[in-house]
Amino acid sequence: LYFDGGGLLATADGGCVRLWSLERRRRICTLKTMQGKDELHAGGVSSIAIDDVHLLSGGGDGSLHLFDLEELQHTATLRGHGAPISEGMLLQAGSHRARALSSSVDGTVKLWDASGYAIGELLPAIVNNVPPQPLPLSIERGSSNGGGVPSKLFCGRAGVLHALDLQTEARSAAVPLPGRAMPRSATNGKTCLHVTCAAGDGSLGASGIDGTSRLVAT
């Protein structure tokens, strides 16, 4: 489920996404594809993100769908991942060349525009024998770039915390994280990172990875 912080709740039920009004305490609708189907993702819904009047869903089929919540209409399908979606995020309209970010369990991180075109790949797929793992994403909204526009993206992959610069669309730092050793045949002796979370406003100074002030990874 995903709560937008106001009165809208989005829930996943298999391959469907349903919207609920917390104020009215009832279901608003079930989102549909352009073909009028309730099931958005054949592999089930694996991620939901909401930003203002848009919703992004990701699924086990490796695709993402973008919806306009004012019109309750499907606006774009994002295809290009070769593995199930781990997480999707929406960027503030007009703040970047990209409109959406996504990750898949094979280690890929991609950038998309509002029409559904893949405009960049921040991290390629892991090609060695690493089992599929959720690839969590987290955005830092800093004050140094003005107006809280997202500047850094963090993700954990195969025991390494990556910092990705959204302005240059390039990796700016990679830090191996300590963890209990695994057999050398698995992930080169590193445990996989499960969750990352970044929330820095610059008020504490640039003391963490790649200048972020607060960062949590588990």
Image (cartoon, rainbow, N blue to C red):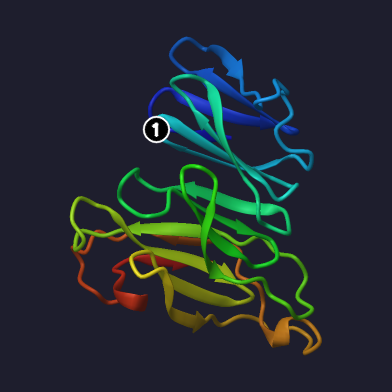
Q: Is residue 141 visible?
A: yes
Q: Position of residue 108 (x, y in %)?
A: 62, 65
Question: Label 1 sits on what residue type?
Answer: Gly
Taking 48 as reference, is 107 above or below it? Answer: below
Taking 98 as reference, is 175 above or below it? Answer: below
Q: Quadrant of residue 163?
A: bottom left
**Dot 1 surroundings within 10 Å: few (below 14), some, or many (20 or more)?**
few
Residue sitting nearer the eye, 35 or 59: 35
Q: Position of residue 2 (x, y in %)?
A: 53, 35
Question: Which residue corresponds to the image point at 55% horizontal and 60% vertical from the top-left?
Answer: 110
Name the outermost residue toward the bottom.
Answer: 184
Tell me: 155 left or right of 200: right
Tell me: 131 left or right of 94: right
Question: Which residue corresponds to the image point at 54% horizontal and 45% vertical from the top-left?
Answer: 116
Question: Which residue corresponds to the image point at 65% horizontal and 26% vertical from the top-left?
Answer: 34
Residue annotated with mark 1:
5
Q: Quadrant of residue 151?
A: bottom left
Q: Is residue 208 visible?
A: no
Identify the element where label 1 is drawn: loop
Taking 176 as reference, is 63 above or below it? Answer: above
User: Where is the N terminus found, in terms of image quarters?
Assistant: top right
User: Where is the C terminus found, in terms of image quarters?
Assistant: bottom right
Q: Position of residue 101 (x, y in %)?
A: 50, 54
Residue sitting nearer the eye, 119 or 38: 119
Residue sitting nearer the eye, 169 or 188: 169
Taking 150 as reference, is 158 above or below it? Answer: below
Q: Position of residue 42 (x, y in %)?
A: 79, 39
- Count of numbered marks: 1
